């Protein structure tokens, strides 16, 4: 179900809202919009649980924009490739779910154990990027002024585009950690909420429903065969 939720978000355009909400606030930070790869990957990992989906989704919206603005392509790809691995650790990580099933461990406890290290790694990625930008980014214009040209009020209005994803993340994590739902039940709620949010934003139709469902089934079957091979 978490896979299906990620596929819905991937196809409904909600990831674009995430970029619009983050980018105005990151222009003054050394490294500027390269941080959208890191923070965006962390946020999307928290709603899809897949590193591959995180890399594909965040990369589709950030890499063309970063290339258009003249950012270093090696750092753009490097920050994306490294930060997308957060999907392996930040709940609801599919890898942790598979590990919990195979080893008969509590998936809720695995999720709780993954969130702290995941946030720590995210902070380390950002710290490295800041140091790199301060040491080598001056000639590339990555340490200076705000290039968004937005007022504070405009930035706040753009931040509202993050609210659906933040509410989705918060609802899932709170329901699991608060003991209100099991991971499976929380995943089902996440799918329903992602459909509602996508429909509300006008980017959900029968074609998206069908393609996201088929993609989730393919991924789930792949994982099932991996588990079957491990148990045989």
Image: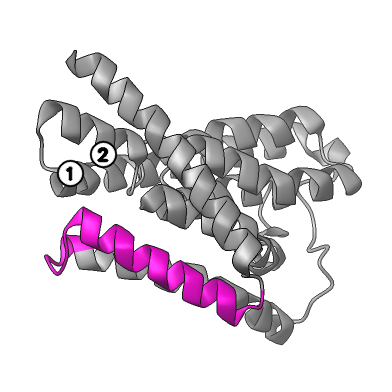
Residue 173 in percent (x, y) is at 28, 62
| Quadrant in the picture for residue 206 | bottom right
Q: Is residue 18 visible?
A: no
Q: Nearer the viewer, residue 149 or 223?
A: 223
Residue at the spot 69% in from the left edge and 39% down from the top edge: 134
- Describe residue 228's horizontal placement relative to residue 219 as left or right: left
Image marks 2 and 1: residues in contact by CB distance under 8 Å: yes
- Describe residue 106's horizontal placement relative to residue 3 as left or right: left
- Describe residue 1's horizontal placement relative to residue 76 as left or right: left
- Describe residue 55's horizontal placement relative to residue 185 as left or right: right
Labels in figure, total: 2
Residue 107 disc label:
1
Label 2, label 1: how many angstroms apart (C-alpha)? Answer: 6 Å
Residue at the spot 70% in from the left edge and 82% down from the top edge: 152
Residue 161 in percent (x, y) is at 61, 75
Residue 53 in percent (x, y) is at 54, 42
Q: Is residue 23 magenta?
A: no
Tell me which numbered mark, 2 or 1, is placed earlier along the sequence. 2
Residue 176 in percent (x, y) is at 20, 61
Residue 97 disc label:
2
Q: Is residue 126 above or below residue 161?
A: above
Q: Nearer the viewer, residue 78 or 197?
A: 197
Give neighbour class at mark 1: few <14, some 14-19, many 20+ (Cα, 10 Å): many
**Image: magenta residue range:** 176-202
Q: Residue furthest bottom?
A: 153
């Amino acid at each position: 179900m978490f896979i299906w939720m990620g596929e819905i978000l991937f196809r409904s355009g909600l990831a674009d809202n995430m970029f619009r909400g983050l980018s105005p606030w990151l222009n003054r930070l050394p490294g500027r919009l390269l941080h959208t790869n890191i923070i965006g990957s962390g946020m999307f990992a928290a709603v899809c649980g897949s590193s591959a989906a995180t890399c594909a989704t965040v990369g589709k919206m950030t890499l063309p924009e970063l290339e258009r603005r003249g950012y270093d392509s090696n750092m753009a790809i490097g920050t994306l490739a490294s930060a997308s691995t957060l999907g392996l650790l930040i709940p609801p990580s599919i890898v942790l779910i598979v590990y919990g099933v195979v080893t008969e461990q509590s998936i809720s406890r695995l999720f709780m154990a993954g969130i702290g290290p995941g946030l720590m790694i995210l902070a380390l990625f950002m710290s490295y990027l800041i140091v790199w930008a301060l040491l080598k980014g001056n000639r590339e214009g990555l340490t200076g002024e705000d290039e968004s040209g937005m007022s504070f009020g405009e930035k706040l209005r753009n931040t509202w585009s993050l609210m659906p994803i933040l509410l989705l993340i918060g609802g899932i994590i709170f329901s699991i950690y608060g003991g209100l739902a099991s991971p499976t039940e929380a995943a089902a709620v996440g799918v329903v909420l992602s459909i509602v949010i996508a429909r509300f934003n006008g980017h959900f139709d029968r074609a998206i429903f069908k393609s996201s469902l088929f993609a989730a089934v393919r991924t789930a079957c792949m994982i099932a065969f991996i588990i079957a091979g491990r148990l045989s």
